[in-house]
Image (cartoon, rainbow, N blue to C red):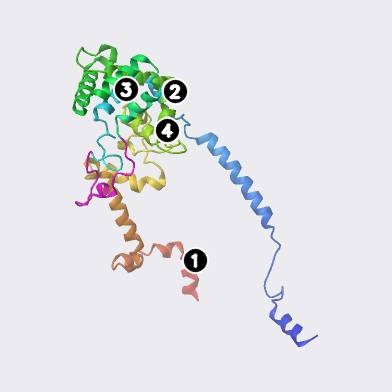
Amino acid sequence: MTATAERRRRATPDSHDYPTRSYDLVKEFVVALAVVTALSLLLAAIFSSPDDKAITMSGWAKADPADVVATAAGELAGTTTSATYGPPYNNASEGQSVLGLKLQKWGGVGIPINSADLVLQPLRDVAADPGLATALRVWDTLQASAQTRLATAYSDALAKAPDGNPARVAPGRYGPVPSLTSAFLRLAASGGLEGALTSSGTFYGGDQTRAMLLLSDGAYLEDQAVADHLGGDQWGMMNEVGNYPGQPWMWLYTFWYQVKPFSTSDNADAQVWALMMALTVGLALIPWIPGLRDIPRWIPVHRLVWREHYRRTQQS
């Protein structure tokens, strides 16, 4: 045997020095995958969350037509949530702020949306009906102040009508607004509104922003959420129904919305975000913060976890 071979033999651990056993990694992986898949299917069948269908404009129009008409009137009047939200959609307000820092305003209007266009643009695309074409023409001839006045008057009249029924609105001077909102309701019920909203504004026509803003401006979406215990004061959005504290990984964020001053603040979104950023930075800096870094020494929970290790160390 050459000197090189002898050195290799000595450098190679002998099976008597280190105990070994055969191990089929592929088999272990397949078995683990099969077990996890079976458990997932079984638990999903037993504890599955409700698979509710997405709310569509057509479904909204058929389930609550009065809300569709009221929302359309509010969009024309500029009084809906999205119309008065501020950046990134418009300059109607300065938006959320933290400690006087106007974060939302600094972000600017990145997705400019005119609330009235959420109603008018889809109607212009289907203005083959002579009555609708006339109503649009009359609307366009009005000054902005007159448009707002007429739409606001009709929106207020809808709020006073029994059950918000457009057919029971008190007579008044509303201009072309009733005709526009009625045509808007017909378009929504036909299923054409959703496509008209998502196909505009982007090249590929898949932007859901305008559709979601319009739907959230109405009361129907929130009513459905509250009925399933998913309202903001019920811990917000989650898969499970019931008044539970949301997803486990979201509880720390949603928790702050349930306590003051966040629960009563108009700037809760920005304030909670800032607080979570501060807590995250604090967590990352724990090893350098005097006092906090000493907590494991004062409360040695780790010694319970590693008690066998410490027992062996003390015995040796």
Instruction: Name the quadrant containing residue 284.
Output: bottom left
Q: CA distance from mark 4 to mark 2?
A: 12 Å
Above or below, comparing residue 217 to residue 163 in the picture = below
- Relative placement, left or right, of 28 versus 250 is right
- Residue position for label 2: 191
The span from disc 4 to disc 1 (Cα, nearest Å) is 62 Å
Q: Which mark is residue 198?
A: 4
Point out the tag, 2 or 1, that comes first from the N-terminus.
2
Give whichever of discs 4 and 3 has the lower sequence position.
3
For the N terminus, give its image quadrant. Answer: bottom right
Asked if disc 4 and disc 3 are in contact, CB closer than 8 Å, the reply is no
| 19, 163: nearer the viewer | 163
Residue at screen point 29% across, 32% down:
115
**What residue is pinned by disc 1?**
308
Secondary structure mostly seen in magenta is loop
118 displayed left or right of 26: left
